[in-house]
Amino acid sequence: MKLITERLGRQLQGQVITDCKTTRDNLRVFAQSIRGARVERIFCKGKHIFLEFSPDIFLQNHLLMRGRWRTVKGRLLLLPTEMWLALEVGNVTVSNVNGQVLRVLDRDGLQQQLDSLGLDVMSAECSRERIVAAMRREEAPLGEVLLDQSVLSGIGNVAKSEALFLARIHPQARVSILRPERVAKLAESILYVMWESYRAGGRWTHRVYRRAGMRCYECGNRIAMIRQGKQRRSTYFCPVCQIV
């Protein structure tokens, strides 16, 4: 998300919205209100992107699995239904395709959303020590803790599986039973895989993710997959390399 936010910042920050179109009924008042407004800043926390328009209008975006931002030259007279929002600046149109979440906020609403999210693992304020402290407060299995955005924001399914593999920790292990050095190793692994993907332009190195039934690169045994938490999210791991 950091890469997408940086790209949007280069395209929009400081620009004046000459026109805004939407195909969503719940965004029509917003679209009218920001015509002629300036884009003050664009920032993210975890997987959430926030756009600030003058005066004190905020748009929260979570792309989930299908959403994306796209830029085209010129103006669009008609929007396809999958294009939720189109922001015209200068001679380009920056559009949001397939949402998935677009929420209009005032300043208080923005603060509530930011407060609901845990430590952003890609932020300048993040450190190994702060990640350890956040995980230490939780009792759930680590495969669930790492996806809890109120604990650590920004970690998804891929990063969770890859970080646990690099730290050699089983996804059903709980922080309370791990030695301090192993928890610290997990924190280091989280930072490593997140910044590894960032430096690769958003691409991930799949050591275990989506490799169920294939051979582990380290030990040669078969990669396994389990589902965890209320949403039954998949976690990939090596039963031999990753121990409780």
Image (cartoon, rainbow, N blue to C red):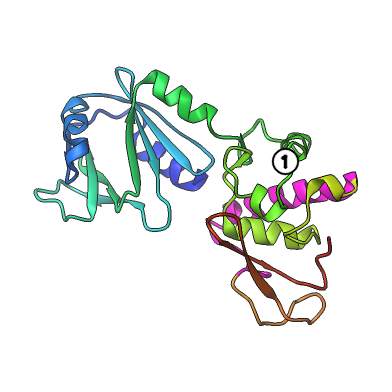
Q: Position of residue 12 (x, y in %)?
A: 33, 35
What residue is drawn where x is 66% and y is 30%? 125
Q: Is residue 108 visible?
A: yes
What residue is drawn where x is 79% and y is 59%? 169
Amino acid identity at mark 1: Glu
Nearer to the camera, 202 or 130: 130
Q: Is residue 32 magenta?
A: no
Q: Is residue 126 left or right of residue 58?
A: right
Number of numbered discs on residues: 1
What residue is drawn where x is 64% and y is 77%? 212
Q: Position of residue 114 (x, y in %)?
A: 50, 29
Q: Is residue 206 magenta?
A: yes
Quadrant of residue 5 in the image? top left
Compared with residue 65, is residue 101 higher up or lower down, i.e. above or below?
above
Which residues fall within the magenta stretch? 180-209
Q: Is residue 90 visible?
A: no
Instruction: Tell me which secondary structure the magenta stretch mostly adopts.
Output: helix
Q: Position of residue 179 (x, y in %)?
A: 90, 48
Residue furthest out toward the front: 230
Q: Position of residue 236 (x, y in %)?
A: 66, 68
Residue carrying label 1: 138
Quadrant of residue 210 in the image? bottom right
Nearer to the camera, 214 or 6: 214
Q: Is residue 10 left or right of residue 203?
A: left
Could you say whether the residue bearing mark 1 is in a helix, strand or loop? loop
For label 1, count other residues whose C-alpha is less than 10 Å away and answer few (under 14), some (14-19) or many (20+).
some
